[in-house]
Amino acid sequence: MIKVENVTMKFRMANDRINSLKEFVVKKTLGKITYKEFTALKNVSFSIQKGEVVGIIGNNGAGKSTLLKVISGIMEPTTGSVKVQGSIAPMLELGAGFDVDLTARENIFLNGAVLGYSKKYLTERYDDIVEFSELADFMDVPIRNFSSGMTMRLAFSIATLVDPDILIVDEILSVGDGSFQKKSAKRMRELMSGGTTVILVSHSIEQIREMCSKVIWLEDGLVQMVGDTRDVCRAYNDKMKNDYLINEQKTMSKKEDNTNWKTKLYTPTSIEKIGELYFIVDCWHHRVIYNSNLTDPIENWKTLSNNIGDPHSIVSDGIFYLVEDGQLNEVKVFKKENNIFRQIQIIEQLGRRPNRLIYDSDNKKYYGISAMSQHVFVLSNEEDETIICEKVIRLGYLKEGSYIRSISLIDKELYFVSGPGKIIVANYMNSSFDKLREYKVPFELQGMNDITKIGSYYYISVYQNGAGEIAPRLVRVKDLDDLAESKYEDIYAELGLEGVPYNFSFIEDRVFLTEIDSYSSIISFKVDGDKIIDVCSYYEAGPATDSSLWRRNS
């Protein structure tokens, strides 16, 4: 069915950054463009028989996606050969091959043609595709008006309902809402049982074990192992554990000063109490720590994970614990088993730099914002077994290119602050996120961090002014309309702050506020009749040490 023989794939990458066509022509004419060669695949060989379900595993950069593109015919190998018998439906990126200016109806025929199917065949299957996608009311709507979830559903329906001989799937098995995910999983099982050959790339070893009968392990472009799923996955996990231990040993062997960061906080972006445990998100130390009290020194706290790139928040429904990884553009999901937290899932394709998560216990959904791409996403608990992504949408009223630091739930409405240079309020209960109203803010407050309501006041933490200069403030106001005329109360000095006030949280009868950037600390206070009383400080680390700066950049 598929035979890959001695396939090598090389790419040429220019050593210099070229910013314009003119610069390229000049440097090309003068012979000043130099290249370095990168080999993504190295003498890869294997065969796949008809009806097999084969998984491909390996770390990021191992060559998995490149291999799928070579098998799909999207790329031609530098050397070696690939022989494929049968039609291929590659799901390397759902929605690729769509024209956003065409309607969904037109894109069914366009995308089907890209996959190699005739107009007659697509006409025969058209009703089945529409019915499966659950988008019958949107067939005459241009794709550009679709949400990402609708686009994914349409693409999945086309790719899987045309009965391909070979289905190639690259990290795309969570499509649409919960009910559609169940339907798509059932469809995948039907294809497998019906004799379709499936090649699946996934970082989820559990998913590979469940679905695949054979596994190929790639590392640095080389085939490390091909064979029975259980044997290959066990060998891969053993290698990952061994590599982790080696890296830990290397870290421990660094000079002693580089471990001092573990005793302090550096830009704690959030503190929460979940159940009986306190959690601190220690952002620039790339970790989340937890403890049963706020009196033990930081070095005695346990670590949920110390390998999360710039985390900002942690939320939980009591079953799952979610933390965003801003560097990898993903949300990591943890579960507590036998008093040990274990990472069980990674949720991707949520936009660029997910920066804040909140949980609404009333409708039992998680909401998140991706700061750099202005995407809002909705996640939910699927029968205490997994977290599913219900929706990812970019909201047009959020300023493109802005940095949206926070979302907050206040009086059953969703508040956006920071990037737009204004406060925007939206309806979130039906996941429409329709804008309800907005409030202008003055120049000195335009780089906001967070907003909450305590008593009759709105409290707003501020990082920067409208010019992007760091100018921390903590203000409160009863009527948000008064902000436009700079009518607010600045309480920064009253609370004795020295750094940038960041995130508010509520623990028992106290308000907690984290302090970040130039000065790291956590404070709490009570509010009695709108009067701030009983201000306390915790884990005051002050300015960053050399050890903390090293950890931030490590």
Image (cartoon, helix red, strand yellow):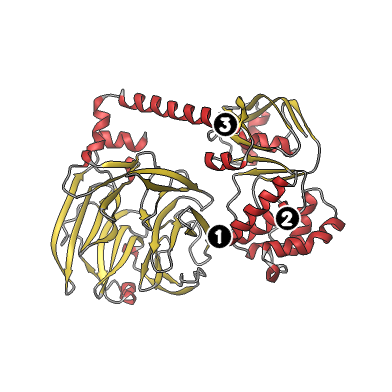
Say whether marks 2 and 3 touch (CB < 8 Å): no
Q: Which image quadrant for residue 48?
A: top right
The residue identified by callout 1 is 178
Mark 2 or mark 3: which comes first in sequence? 3
Task: Give the Cα distance between marks 2 and 3.
Answer: 29 Å
Residue 413 point in image, percent of width and height: 40, 72
User: Callout 3: 10 Å neighbours few (<14), some, many (20+)?
Assistant: some
Mark 3 or mark 1: which comes first in sequence? 3
Task: Give the Cα distance between marks 3 and 1.
Answer: 31 Å
Amino acid, disc 2: Ile
Name the quadrant of the N terminus: top right
Task: Give the Cα distance between marks 2 and 1.
Answer: 19 Å
Q: Describe residue 475's horizontal placement relative to residue 197 as left or right.
A: left
Amino acid, disc 3: Ala
Residue 506 point in image, percent of width and height: 26, 62
Q: Is residue 160 above or below residue 6?
A: below
State the residue in front, 77 or 55.
55
State the residue in front, 489 or 32.
489
Q: Which image quadrant for residue 218?
A: top right
Residue 401 in view here: yes
Say whether marks 3 and 1 touch (CB < 8 Å): no
Q: Is residue 464 above or below residue 73?
A: below
Disc 2 element: helix
| Residue at x 53% of width, y 65% of height | 396
Farthest left residue in view: 534
Q: Describe residue 20's horizontal placement relative to residue 315 as left or right.
A: right
Disc 3 element: loop
| Residue at x 57% of width, y 29% of height | 232
Name the quadrant of the C terminus: top left
Q: Describe residue 362's horizontal placement relative to residue 349 as left or right.
A: left
The residue identified by callout 2 is 158
The residue identified by callout 3 is 62
